[in-house]
Image (spheres, grey):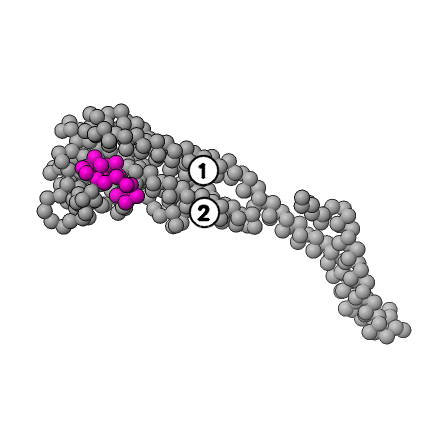
Amino acid sequence: MLRRYNLVSGRAVEVTEGETSILKYIAPDSTDLHTLVHDFGIDEHNLQSALDPDELGRLEVEDNGTLVLILKRPRSSPGQQQSEIGVTSVGICLGGGRMVVIQQEDADLLEERMNQKMGGLHDVLLRILYSTINHFLSHLRAIHGLSDALEDKIVRSMENRYLIEMFALEKSLVYYLNAVTSNARLLRKLQAGATRYGFSGEQIEVLDDIVIENEQCLKQVEIYSNIVAGLMDARGTIVGNNQNLLLRQLTILNIVFLPLNVLASIGGMSEYTMMTRGIPWPLAYTCFLVAMVLLGTLTWLAMRNLGVERRPRRS
C-alpha cells in the first residue's frame, strides 16, 4: 500500500494525487518492490533489510548520494499479548528532494509531540527519529505496568502461566535492548556526519537532543531488563513455595482427619451400639462426637507445637 504526503504549514498532510515529497510504502508487494528498485534506484539489499525484522539498525550513503537509514521500532501494541511484543525495521531513503519510507506494518511515524515544525525533509527525518524513541518509552511504561500486575498474580499463583508471561516480557526487553542499542549506533553516525548529510545548525542541535533522549531510553531499557531478569529465579521460587504451602495444608488436614475417620468407621458399625447398650444412644453418640472433636483439636495442637503449622510472625 502506498500513502503520499506533502509538507503544508510545517505538517505532513496526506494527499492522493500530484507531486509528493514523502512516499510511505506499507508491506510493499512485488509491483511496489519493482518500482522502488528500478524507478527510485533503491538498492535491493537495503530494501530487503527494511522489511526484515531481524535486521540491525544502520546508516548508509548510496552511490547517488541517497541517505539510507534502517531504523528499529517496537512492533505491536503493548496492550496485546506479551508473546506478540517485538521489534520491526523501517527503511528511510532520503535524497533527490524526496523521502521514501518502507515499513512492513502501518504505524504513525510522525507523532505531533515534537514542537518544532517541519520545514523540510530533514525535519521530517528528525520527527521520525523522535517518534521512534517516544514509542519505545511508551512501550517500556506499558511493560513496567504489566510486570507489576504479573508480580501480584505470581505471589498468589500455584501454576506456571503467569511465570511464562513474565518470561515473554523478559524476552521482549532483550529485543528492545538490542534494537535501541543499534539505533544508538545509527544516531551517533548520523550525528558525526550531520553537516555532510545536509543538516542545518538548528537541526543539528535537535539531533543532539535526540541522541541524548535515545541514550536515556537505552539506560531505561537496560534497567528494566536487568530487574526482570534478576528476579526471575525469585519469582519461580515463589510459585514453588505456594505449591509447597498448599501440599502442607492438605497434609495437615489428612493427619487431623485420619484418626477421626477410623473412629467414625467404628462408630458407624453395630459394635459401638453393642458396647454402649446400657447407655441411651443420644448420650452415647454425643459423647462419641465430643471425643472426636477433642481428638482432632489435640492432634492439631500437637502438630502446631511441633512447628508443622507454625507461621512466621509479621513485623
Which residue is pictured at 38% across the width and 50% down the height? Answer: 80
Which residue is pictured at 79% across the width and 66% down the height? Answer: 289
Spatial CA span between label 2 and label 1: 12 Å
Determine which residue is flagged by label 1.
224
In the picture provided, is 130 more to the left or to the right than 30?
A: right
Could you say which quadrant of the image residue 19 lies in? Answer: top left
Could you say which quadrant of the image residue 240 lies in? Answer: top right
Q: Residues within 10 Å of mark 2 (few under 14, many from 20)?
A: some
> Residue 127: x percent and y percent?
26, 39
In the picture provided, is 245 more to the left or to the right than 113?
A: right
Determine which residue is flagged by label 2.
146
Residue 90 in view, yes or no: no
Which residue is pictured at 30% across the width and 27% down the height? Answer: 188
Above or below residue 238? Residue 265 is below
Tell me which amino acid carries mark 1. Tyr
Residue furthest to the right: 278
> Residue 39: x percent and y percent?
11, 38
Above or below residue 200? Residue 245 is below
Tell me which amino acid carries mark 2. Leu
Element at label 2: helix
What is the span of residues highlighted in magenta in the rendered image? 110-127
Residue 47, disc: none
Above or below residue 48? Residue 280 is below
> Residue 132: x percent and y percent?
31, 39
> Residue 192: x percent and y percent?
27, 24
Element at label 1: helix
Above or below residue 287? Residue 296 is above
Q: Residues within 10 Å of mark 1 (few under 14, many from 20)?
A: many
Residues tagged 2 and 1 counted as in contact (Cβ below 8 A): no
Q: Is residue 213 magenta?
A: no
Residue 203 in view, yes or no: yes
Q: Is residue 124 magenta?
A: yes
